[in-house]
Image (cartoon, helix red, strand yellow):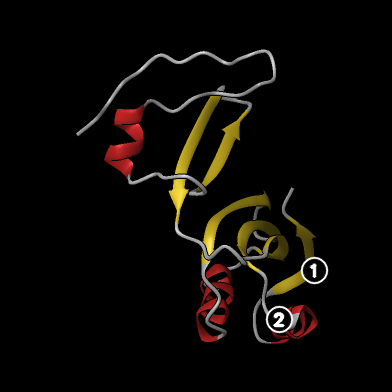
Amino acid sequence: MKDVKIIAVDNRGRIVLPLVTRKNLGITTNSQLMLVSDSETKEIRITPIGLRDESNLIKLKIVMKDIPGALAKILDIFAEEKISLIYSEAVIIEKDVKAILTAISESPSDINQLKNILTEKGEALDVEFNPLD
C-alpha cells in the first residue's frame, strides 16, 4: 500500500513523519533510517533499517578493476566475512579500466584484514574506510 503525504521542512531542517506512515512501516522511537539523496534527480529516499543500537556504521569506497566478475568477487568476500551491506552502489569510472563501489555496512572487527582480503582475493585496487556522518 502506498501512502502519499506532503510534509514541510522546519527552520532547523527537520521533517515529521506522519503517524500513519510510522505505523505502516513499523517505525518507532529510536528506529534507524537511511537517507539517500540524489542531487541530479533532486530526490530523497528514506528507508527504515534494522540495526542494533550499538552498530558502528562505516562508509567504504572500493576502487576496483572494471572487468567481468570483479563486483561479484568483492561482494562474495563480504558474504564470506559475514558483513552485511546496508547500501551499495557501483559506478564505472573508466570503461574496462576501473569502477568504484560505494557501500555502507556495519564496521568489521578488523578493517585492515578486510582491506587485505579485498585487494588480494578480490579485484580491489584501493579501499577507503570512513565513519558514517
Name the mark on residue 113: none
Give the residue drawn at x 55%, y 56%.
88
Amino acid type of the residue tagged 1 in the rendering: Asp
Amino acid type of the residue tagged 2 in the rendering: Leu
Asked whether residue 124 appears in the rendered view, the answer is: yes
N-terminal of the pair, mark 2 or mark 1, is: 2
From this view, report whether residue 45 is shown above or below residue 63: above
Give the residue drawn at x 52%, y 26%.
43
Q: Residues within 10 Å of mark 1 (few under 14, many from 20)?
A: some
From this view, report whether residue 54 is shown above or below residue 37: below
Q: Nearer the viewer, mark 2 or mark 1?
A: 2
Q: Position of residue 62 (x, y in %)?
A: 71, 64
Q: Position of residue 109 (x, y in %)?
A: 70, 82
Quarter holding residue 5: top left
Task: Please count the marks in the image.
Answer: 2
Mark 2 vs mark 1, CA separation in Å: 12 Å
Dividing the image into 4 quarters, which one contains the N terminus?
Answer: top left
From this view, report whether residue 87 is shown above or below residue 47: below
Position of 2 compared to 132: left or right? left
Q: Position of residue 20 (x, y in %)?
A: 29, 29
Name the mark on residue 126: 1
In the foreground, 84 or 61: 84
Q: Residues within 10 Å of mark 2 (few under 14, many from 20)?
A: some
Q: Position of residue 128 (x, y in %)?
A: 79, 64
Quarter holding residue 21: top left
Give the residue drawn at x 48%, y 49%.
31
Mark 2: which secondary structure? helix
Position of 87 compared to 59: left or right? left
Q: Which residue is mark 2?
A: 114
Asked whether residue 68 appears in the rendered view, the answer is: no
